[in-house]
Amino acid sequence: MPTPPPADVIEPHTWTNEIQTRAEFDRRLATGSLVGLTIQGLHLDLDPVPDLTGVEVAGTLFVGCRFASRQVGADLVRRGANVVPPFSGLAYPTQPPHLYTPEELAAGFTEGGFEAMYDTRVYAHFRAHGGALPDVREALGQRLHDHGVDNALADATRTWLTTHGPQSVVGVMGGHAVPRGSAPYRMAAVLGRELARAHRLVVTGGGPGVMEAANLGAYLSTRPAEELTAAIDLLATAPDFTDHDRYTAVALQVRKVFGRSITPPGDGTEPVTDYRADSAALTTGDLDWATCGGLAIPTWLYGHEPANLFAGRIAKYFSNAIREDTILRLARGGIVFAPGRAGTVQEVFQAATKTYYGTDGASGAYVFLDRAYWTTELPVESLLRPLLSTSPFGDLSDTIHLTDDAHEAVHLLTAQGGAPC
């Protein structure tokens, strides 16, 4: 029988040798040695261009950094450094230093519509280079990108987890095709709002439907409930996510009308692959994003779906497998399953496997919204409850709850400790 991995395998680690901001790089550079450090995604070709000629660089790893010339990189290698330069010809950075913001994914929409968005252009590149089965060069670029997202996600969530604990992170799963303005959409939005107001970090898969609704509720969590209703009514004028341009335009209109925008690096005018600003404000120490939309973790495997533009931070991956595991690993405070089809059912049992074996530690409640759906239309409960009752850690079937009320769902997820309310 499988046993949980050792605690050190799943606990977040802090790597003090990873340098991701220009300020920290300059501080280390002033000591005269970069030995053993990993320098990630920095623009070392911008003024003031650092003088690296007299610096010790034995064993230093430069990943996705830009230098003033090729000669600089070659000289570093001659002196014992390892250099993995940014790949040319990619539509995305190979080492993003921070999670995406909605503004970054939507960059280009105002000028050229959905097809001109950064998010859409990356998806077009992804499809043109083999999709989920890319050639070796593209695969390396995608893996480096996703590792950068892993790093940025750990940085972005570290302060939250230190302050509130792992039981304060709640996942929300459900159908991507739920129309804006529908009863399930409104329920998910209320759920997201109330969870955020209870100091929970809302995490979704970053798609449309239930996922967008939950992030929307968290996005407007500090505003009156009437404003959430008004925002949904406005979004309902473009209910179908397959109508890409209208769907995205109305989302951006809601962001403009209701505010609560998170400022991207610099002045917001740089292209998304040009990370010129110090990214510290987008990583450690800043929790505004957590209470302004929460976290979304989508994938370009489903890049045909419009980006969810209401999350405070977006960890977008190429690998869907990494993305799905990451959502469930983070959601230690419980998961809400709204009605959905095959994808949602897959997530139910993938999560149940982690809970059954204690893979990521203790799990919170499993709350199924719409009792009739989960007991009659898709009777998942009838299989899940006896399964969890036989866990090596005892009978865990009492973690399963069914309800038709978003407020009751929030109570179930917040009544068992976790973050202070």
Image: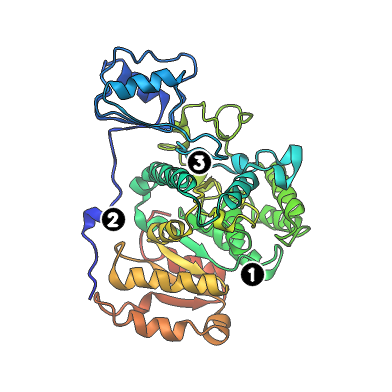
Q: Which mark is residue 109?
A: none
For marks 1 and 3, the one nearer the N-term is 1
Measuring 40% from the left and 15% from the top, which residue is drawn there?
Answer: 50
Crowd class of label 2 (few under 14; some 14 to 19; many from 20; radius 10 Å): few
Amino acid marked by disc 2: Ile
Q: Quadrant of the N terminus?
A: bottom left
Residue 329 pos. (x, y %): 38, 59
Give the image's coloring scheme: rainbow
Q: CA distance from mark 2 to mark 3?
A: 26 Å
For marks 2 and 1, the one nearer the N-term is 2
Measuring 64% from the left and 57% from the top, which residue is drawn there?
Answer: 305
User: Is 290 situated above or below 341?
Assistant: above
Q: Nearer the viewer, residue 75 or 170?
A: 75
Query: Regarding mark 1 in the picture, which secondary structure is present there?
Result: helix
Indicate which label's residue lies in the foreground, 2 or 1.
Answer: 2
Query: Regarding mark 2 in the picture, which secondary structure is present there?
Result: helix
For marks 2 and 3, the one nearer the N-term is 2
Residue under pointer 1: 184
Residue under pointer 3: 288
Residue 99 pos. (x, y %): 49, 42
Measuring 69% from the left and 55% from the top, which residue is drawn there?
Answer: 226
Indicate which label's residue lies in the foreground, 2 or 3.
Answer: 2
Q: Which mark is residue 10?
A: 2
Amino acid marked by disc 1: Pro
Crowd class of label 3 (few under 14; some 14 to 19; many from 20; radius 10 Å): some
- Let me know if residue 221 appears in the view: no
